[in-house]
Image: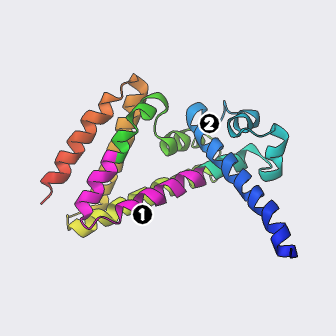
Amino acid sequence: MTDSEESRGPRAKAAGKRRQLTAAAARVLHEQGVERTTIADIARAADVPAGNVYYYFKTKDELVEAALSEHATNLEALTGRLDQLADPRERLKRLVDAWVSQRDTAARYGCPTGTLAAELDKRAEGGLDLTAGRVIRQLLEWVEAQYRQIGVADPEGHALALVGAYQGMSLLSNALRDPEIMAREGARLTRELDSLG
């Protein structure tokens, strides 16, 4: 066995453990928020000893950043699948469907990125709040590109309205613990997309 073959195993194992911790961080931070979550909570969710977390992430903020990266990766995967559809209007409708399919989770915990962005914004400027903002900007830019392809006037305004509607329905579903808000609002958004000229 060569040196590279011997070292590939431990590196792959370490990368897998890091991914496991990142996914657990994204889930636990969404469910509990940044301030309530401890490194031990994330270790427990990832089924690793708490001391091992420090090998991969030196601080809780590094875990928060990894969770935001996980949200960005999930968004890229979703928009990548949607980009396979030929019609930009259909892409947006399927995006709304994806949001609505998460209504029970949203009613319990809110939007994964939106809730983190709101919580991180209460910290000093220029930190993780900017990272959360980049994930939301990524969604806005993708939605704007779809409206641009449809040919509507003011695609940026339409993108802000659609993403704002999503954040609003997530917040209201969460605050009122009512997942049907997302179902109703999702149906309304789909009708609006169907009516675009």
Q: Residue 192 location, x and y as percent?
A: 18, 48
Magenta-drawn segment:
68-97
Q: Nearer the viewer, residue 129 or 147?
A: 147
Q: Residue at x 60, y 44 (%)?
A: 26
Q: Nearer the viewer, residue 59 or 11?
A: 11
Q: Residue 119 location, x and y as percent?
A: 57, 38
Q: Residues within 10 Å of mark 1 (few under 14, many from 20)?
A: few
Residue 121 is drawn in which quadrant?
top right
Tell me the chief SS of the magenta region.
helix
Residue corresponding to mark 2: 28
96 versus 72 height, above or below: above
Q: Residue at x 70, y 38 (%)?
A: 42
Question: Label 1 amino acid?
Answer: Gly
Name the side, left or right, on which 134 lies relative to 18. Answer: left
The residue positioned farthest toward the front in the image shown: 1
Gap between marks 2 and 1 measured at Cα: 25 Å
Q: Residue at x 22, y 47 (%)?
A: 190
The reply to whether residue 157 is in sight is no
Instruction: Label 2: state its secondary structure.
Output: helix
Residue corresponding to mark 1: 80
Instruction: Label 1: state its secondary structure.
Output: helix
Can you say which quadrant of the picture contains the N terminus? bottom right
Name the side, left or right, on which 24 lies relative to 13. Answer: left
85 versus 184 height, above or below: below
Q: Residues within 10 Å of mark 2 (few under 14, many from 20)?
A: many
